[in-house]
Image (cartoon, rainbow, N blue to C red):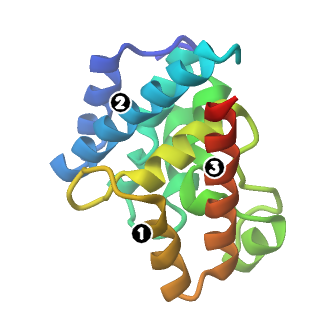
Amino acid sequence: MSKSLPRREQAIELLRKNKCSPQVISHCKAVADLSLELANQLESRGLKLDLKAVETGALLHDIGRSKTNAVDHGMIGAQIAQAEGLPAAVIGIIRTHVGGGFTMEEAVEFGWQKDVYAPVSLEEKIVSYADKLIDNSKGKRVPIEVEINRLRAAGHKEAAERVRKLHEEITAALEN
């Protein structure tokens, strides 16, 4: 694939080619739909966004789940996307969507390359946020408190706080 963005059908086919489960594909479609809804609302408030990158990144955000369901599925997915020749914007979305992002210190603890794995661009933040609002098992929208409480219960207080801050940032932008 070239550095151009694949159409929706091509992105879904890429998930299938990489042997993502039907459940993961369904989740990715739901996240893409919500991401586009949020992005369109933000654009209507005057923010400039790359809607195609949002859609493609959201569709492919969990492509790394074809190899693992561990926390590094975002990094593995970014490697798959890079090997497919996808643009940096999509690779960034995939790489930073997990858990509201990770600090450099957390990355080092995971044994990853020293870097920040947190969403920075608005496109990255939208997909990361939408992912937290779509239940993985049911593909349905859930209140953000469900994910925040899940993270806290699992002992991931910092991640829960990052997700809460992401929620506040996106909802504040939607209210302006």
Residue 101: give x, y in percent of width and height: 67, 58
Image vertical order of residue 30 relative to residue 23, above or below = above
Looking at the rendered structure, the kind of residue marked 1 is Val
Which structural element holds mark 1?
helix
State the separation of the CA atoms marked 2 and 1. 20 Å
Which structural element holds mark 2?
helix
Q: Is there CB contact under 8 Å for labels 1 and 3?
A: no
Q: In the image, which disc is placed on residue 146?
A: 1
| Residue visible at 50% across and 15% down in the picture | 5
Q: Nearer the viewer, mark 2 or mark 1?
A: 1
Image vertical order of residue 116 relative to residue 103, above or below = above
The part of the image, by quadrant, that contains residue 142 is bottom left
Q: In the image, which disc is placed on residue 33?
A: 2
Q: Which residue is mark 3?
A: 96
State the separation of the CA atoms marked 3 and 2. 19 Å
Counting labels gives: 3
Looking at the rendered structure, the kind of residue marked 3 is Thr
| Residue visible at 45% across and 77% down in the picture | 150
Image side of residue 173 versus residue 154, left or right: right
Nearest to N terminus: mark 2 or mark 1: 2
Residue 28: give x, y in percent of width and height: 33, 41
Looking at the rendered structure, the kind of residue marked 2 is Asp
Residue 81: give x, y in percent of width and height: 51, 35
Which structural element holds mark 3?
helix
